[in-house]
Image (cartoon, grey):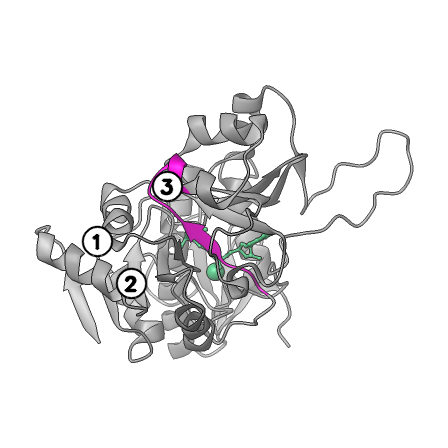
Amino acid sequence: MTVLKTSVLSERDIDCAAEILARGGLLAFPTETVYGLGADACNGIAVARIFAAKNRPRFNPLIVHVPDLAAARRLVVFDETALRLASALWPGPLSLVLPLRKGGGISSLVTAGLDTLAVRIPGPALARDLLVRAGCPVAAPSANPSGRISPTSARHVLDGLSGRIDAVLDGGECDVGLESTIMTSDPPRILRPGGVSREAVEAVLGRRVETASHPAPPSDGSAPDERPNAPGQLQSHYAPQAELRLNAESPASGEIYIGFGVHGDLDGGNGEALNLSPEGDVTRAAANLFTVLRRADELAQGALCKKIAVAPIPNDGLGWAINDRLARAAAPRD
Ligand code: TXA
Ligand code: MG
């Protein structure tokens, strides 16, 4: 497999990457959230290779990446709410789940047979340039083996998928560091918290939005119903090898500690202080989360008790998405 390096951006690297996609290959590429594992969304065989490379369950649908709104409108039907969200927040870390247009050519493997499709326009010019050159909608889950920590650098991609994909386009580290926020427009409901905060979505729409992971109790006092979540939102995900303990004010003896703000600079004997954001900034913490989790996991493998403890993270802004990822990383595994 090839590493296409763009520290000095070369037109040839991007062309070569685009050609891999156009020919039905598997290309890992950088977005502002995490690296995606891309394939032509209209090519069923190419899409099937994504599921095989990641060992991903087939019932878990994929997000399709397009370079602009016109391309998105050829695939899905926008209502007024979706258009407002798209014009305010795209390009950016927001995926909209909208009714699929018949005849748009998207492989049914991408949607796992649903009649909706998740679409987004990624932020970085490099990603959009790649999509224009590829000339096809690109289905891309995060470029990691299913269930493991998502990749925010080309190195992370190689650590998990080397030998299983055709190439990685190396565009440096991802700025946001957490996957996109996924939402429907009718009704406006967040299915997965992510790189756009709930506050930002609500500011655009001028109203509160529903959230599938933390359903608002019905106003008539009856019991909350079980609302559908993003179908692939598995309970255990983003998992390091070590066991994870959350909301830890300090480490127990031998634990590797991941600090945040004032709960920081403590190490459980490993000699390395890991802090998601010493200044207590949740956006910075989001950008650092997956890299720090990987480092903590490496340290834990060398330690006696193989446990990681994480400081409490406030729930505002991107903190909600961080806590969602941490809860899944800490969930019991099968
Ligand atoms: O930031 C991101 O979203 C990254 C980058 C590469 O774009 N991609 C990503 O993909 O996180 P993945 O496959 O790791 O997560 C996709 C999520 C899954 O939870 C899936 O269930 C949900 O999107 N999803 C996809 N299509 C859907 C649909 N039609 N309805 C509801 N959820 C959907
Ligand atoms: Mg993923």
Identity of the amino acid at label 3?
Arg
Ligand 1 within 8 Å of the CB at mark 3? no
Marks 1/3: CA–CA distance: 19 Å
Mark 2 Cα shell of 10 Å, populated few (<14), some (14-19), many (≥20): many
Q: CA distance from mark 2 to mark 3?
A: 32 Å
Q: At x 66% / y 35%, what residue is drawn?
A: 186
* Cβ of mark 1 under 8 A from ligand 1: no
Task: Kindly give the residue lying farthest to the top in the view shown.
Answer: 206
Residue name at image x 28 percent, y 71 percent: 158
Query: Is any part of residue 3 visible from this angle?
Result: yes
Q: Residues within 10 Å of mark 3 (few under 14, many from 20)?
A: some
Amino acid on which the number 2 mark rests in the picture: Leu
> Where the N terminus falls, by quadrant?
bottom left
Q: Quick one: SS at disc 1?
A: loop
- Residue 18 counted in the magenta span: no
Residue beneath disc 2: 21
For mark 2, give the secondary structure: helix
Q: Which residue is mark 3?
A: 284
Q: Quadrant for residue 236, please give it.
A: bottom right
Q: Amino acid at mark 1?
A: Gly
Q: Disc 2 or 3, which lies upstream in sequence?
A: 2
**Which residue is label 1 attached to?**
171
Q: Give the residues drawn in magenta, as a range.
A: 60-71
Q: Earlier in the sequence, mark 1 or mark 3?
A: 1
Q: Could you tell me residue 86's position as x and y percent?
A: 46, 31
Question: Viewer-nearest of labels 2 and 3?
Answer: 2
